[in-house]
Image: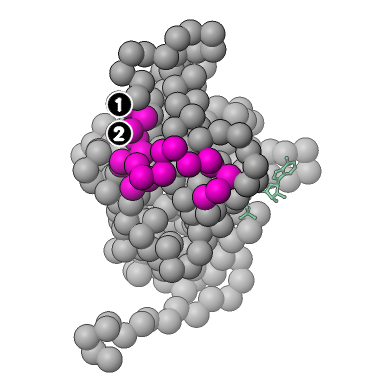
Amino acid sequence: MGKPLIQLQHVYYQYEQTEALKDISLKIEEGDFLAIIGPNGSGKSTLLKIILGLLKPTKGKVLLFSKPVPLFKEKELIGYVSQKSNAFNTGFPATVEEVVKSGLVKKVGLFHPYPKNVDTKVSEALTSVGMEKFSKKNIGELSGGQQQRVFIARALVSNPKVLILDEPTVGVDSKNVRSFYHMLSHLNREHQITIVLVTHDVDAVSKTISHVACLNQSIHFHGFQNEMDSMSDEQLEAWYGHSVRKVTHRKEEQL
Ligand SMILES: Nc1ncnc2c1ncn2[C@@H]1O[C@H](COP(=O)(O)OP(=O)(O)OP(=O)(O)O)[C@@H](O)[C@H]1O
């Protein structure tokens, strides 16, 4: 069993009118590649904001690297890539390497010089997401999917142990979605980065993740990805909030 990096214990979150999260207990361990899936409005983004300390639970406790959130100061250990597509226009005056370098600000602080090996760090981060060839390009000239890879490199440049992504494939065209998840899988396996992502691409992501959490206000299933098939129709309905019929696809070799 890996070290627990993120733990939620009986977490509730209430917006003024809406109870977004109810009694969430979740443990994410070192090395996990977890996908959080659920219908619209099921609390996925709220859950990420709680983990990132952007929202304070109404009730319950969050531990990051075994420390309660207010005592957790090593923010650079957690990289975050928010949901965006084509965030920069064509004319935006920054190169890819400048965008990636800006990811070090969290580590070194504003008004401090970058470390001496900054160029190596930037180049390593770009290589790890397959974007080294684009370092001198203007960020606005890249496609949505390429920009998303650059944002991941920016999150990686401070050597985080955990990478959190909110719907990272928005703006990535369907033929590139699989190679995008393949790149994340590489980061998880070869660079030992624990990955937590929110996604709607259940099918595309299922080949690469280790764990899945099915959320709809509360967690209806959390376990190994291959155990998800064992969810009953009743569990699936409770999770999805409406009637669901399970369809089993035939394996390719049987076709
Ligand atoms: N700032 C807010 N103020 C009030 N209610 C909110 C706020 N943000 C979210 N909610 C409500 O909380 C619930 C959970 O929202 P959340 O955005 O976490 O869901 P989600 O699963 O990320 O949705 P989606 O898949 O559509 O992005 C929804 O009912 C939403 O309307």
Q: Relative to 226, does residue 24 appear above or below in the rendering? A: above
Residue 133 magenta-highlighted: yes
Quadrant of the drawing holding the N terminus: top left
Which region is colored magenta?
121-142
Residue drawn 35% across and 24% down? 119
Q: Residues within 10 Å of mark 2 (few under 14, many from 20)?
A: some
Task: Kindly identify the amino acid type of the residue bearing the numbered disc 2.
Answer: Glu
**Residue at mark 1:** 120
- Residue 2 image offset from top left, x and y in percent: 23, 36
- Most foreground residue, 86 or 181: 86
Q: CA distance from mark 2 to mark 1?
A: 6 Å
**Residue at mark 2:** 124
The quarter of the picture where residue 191 lies is top left
Answer left or right for 79 relative to 254: right
Residue 3 magenta-highlighted: no
Tell me the chief SS of the magenta region: helix
Pointer 2 with pointer 1, Cβ within 8 A:
yes
Residue drawn 33% across and 33% down? 123
Residue drawn 37% across and 30% down? 122
- Most foreground residue, 227 or 251: 251
- Residue 168 image offset from top left, x and y in percent: 50, 50
